[in-house]
Amino acid sequence: MSDVYPEPGSFRDPSGRIYYSGDRVYRSVTSHGAEDFVFVRESGLIDRLSDAGKLIGTKSVSADVLGEYGKDAAFVVEHQRVPFISYPYEWPFPALKAAALLHLDIQLEALEAGISLSDATAYNIQFMGSRPVFIDLLSFRKYRDGEIWAGHRQFCEQFLNPLLLRAKIGLSYNAWYRGSPEGIKASDVRKLLRWRSKLSLNVLAHVVAQAAFQQSSISKTDSKRSLATAKLPQQSYKRMLSKLRTWIETLEPADTGKTVWQDYANTNSYNSDEAAEKRAFIGKFAAATKPAVLWDMGCNTGDYADAALKGGAGYCVGFDADHGALERAFSRAGRDELNFLPLLLDGANPSPSQGWNQRERGGLSARAKADGIIALAFVHHIAIGCNVPLDDVVSWLIGLAPQGAIEFVPKQDPMVQELLALREDIFPDYTEETFLASVRKRAEIVEEKTVTGSGRKLVWFRRHDGPDSDGC
Amino acid sequence: MKFRRFNAAIAMLVFALVLGVDSPAFAYLDPGTGSIMLQLLLGGVAGALMILKLYWYRIKSFFVRDEKPAEKESKDP
């Protein structure tokens, strides 16, 4: 098949590789991974985890589907498609925590079946709404008696240490993690933790002791080789996993804790007339366009994502730069069982393509296109907050999806006045006329509606040149 | 330096005796020395003894200030 191509980020594990063909996702299993794959498949673990929704849906297919790429494959499987691939540096705290717990649960369940995991990378977990799903079938392998937890350091760097930054210091890990996609080192977290945090046995073991051992003089190759034969009794292995699980379950963002949701009922603006009108507009847009995947730019706590999903959107990916809002949005998605995944993203600086060859982790535009977008109270943050010309902001948004709803917040609105309170107004073109002209250059306006006394306007657009046009 | 190499050799011997001879089960992922040593420590007495052995020269040099040069030379593998 000529349209088959490999996933550029799938190269680390010699046991197999991910391929795409149209909308389908395949995984090859090489001779290197074949023995373990057969063992794991026959153990029934894959079916059990898939049935419980913990592992991505998988079925065997003929190697022919991969054409030339399938020639050396011992097996080929097809995976259920994830609506939107996200990366741990985009996950809000409760998402990273849920992913960490899933990883540990899967390890514990696998060990019972005589199976271990060859790694502990957070990139092996994806989300279906707020539900984490393990996607790497080839991380499973036959447990060898006495083997150590090979992925422990990786687990700490990619799950535990970022969580500790937020839970113990109140520091958001996302920017650091994005700049260091392999994770955050124990030695760095050790320097930042307060001494009283270090009194915890868990911190002492997984952060302080691990960092100290790593930095100690045991660096000679001979000594390292001797460590390569180190053994860990299975009971100790399980105890490590279950103790970490118990500990991580108690972690909450510092200074917010579990009060987030108590606060939510008082702060949401659901019931105001303006919000109700906006919800109705978004619901109508979603009902008419039925986008399979909708992006909500500036999703806040997810009020309008919820309206879109109730209206008829299939799946919603929300983006926001506010950690607190995202944490609430994520909790809400779980509580209300919404097909909604809120992610951290600064509209003026979206996730870049990075990693090996700058293709290992796709940037936002390289990863996917949306079927629809909504951008409510978003444009002014980019146009005025970040000085991006209004026409460029509109061009970018319309380039993201063939249809959508954008809100224009005029200059006299208190929210824009707040942005301008301490600075010169250098935005003579920031007007409704410029905004509408920018939209009309690229799209047909299906419907527009003024929703507040200050003149906020909602515009439902349908792009002139169809879904394949490129943005800016 | 030579004394360290001697210690590494001893360490391997202790491993072989205490933990059984085994070929290294390498993962495609480097587990990191810090993580392995922590796991040895959490894994019980045998592992803890191993850690002690790996650090033995440091402990010893803390108490014994000057090693006899001749002894170091003679043990050089």
Image: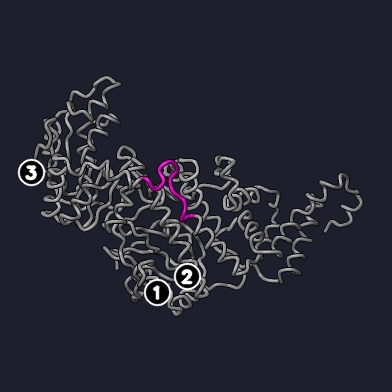
Q: Are marks 2 and 1 in contact (CB under 8 Å)?
A: yes
Magenta stretch in the rendered image: A248-259
Whichever of labels 3 and 1 marks the residue nearer the N terminus, that label is 1
Are there few (<14), some (14-19), or many (20+) residues within 10 Å of tag 3?
few
Dot 2 lies on which element? helix
Residue A462: x percent and y percent? 12, 47
State the residue at coordinates (34%, 39%): A349
Distance, label 3 to label 2, CA atoms, is: 53 Å
Left or right: A2 in relation to A434: right
Position of residue A372 measured from the top left corner of the image (x, y, whole percent) = 19, 50
Residue where numbered disc 1 is placed: A48
Quote the CA–CA distance across marks 2 and 1: 10 Å
Crowd band around label 2 with a 10 angstrom C-alpha radius: few (<14), some (14–19), many (20+): some
**Amino acid carrying mark 1 in the image:** Arg
- The correct choice, above or below, for B12 with respect to A410 in the image is below
Dot label at residue A147: none
User: Is residue A472 part of the magenta span, yes or no?
Assistant: no
Label 3 or label 2, whichever comes before in sequence order: 2
- Which residue is rendered at x = 37% and y = 58% of the image? A126
The quadrant of the image that shows the C terminus of chain A is top left
In depth, the one of A412 and B70 nearer the eye is A412
Residue A165: horizontal and vertical position, in percent? Answer: 49, 44
Q: Is residue A196 left or right of residue A18?
A: right
Chain name for mark 2: A
Q: Residue at 69%, 62% (x, y): give it.
A: B47
Amino acid type assigned to the residue bearing label 2 in the image: Glu
- What is the chain identity of the residue bearing mark 3? A
Pinpoint residue A90: horizontal percent, then vertical percent.
37, 48
Quickly name the residue at label 2. Answer: A109
User: In this rendering, is residue A422 above or below A368?
Assistant: above
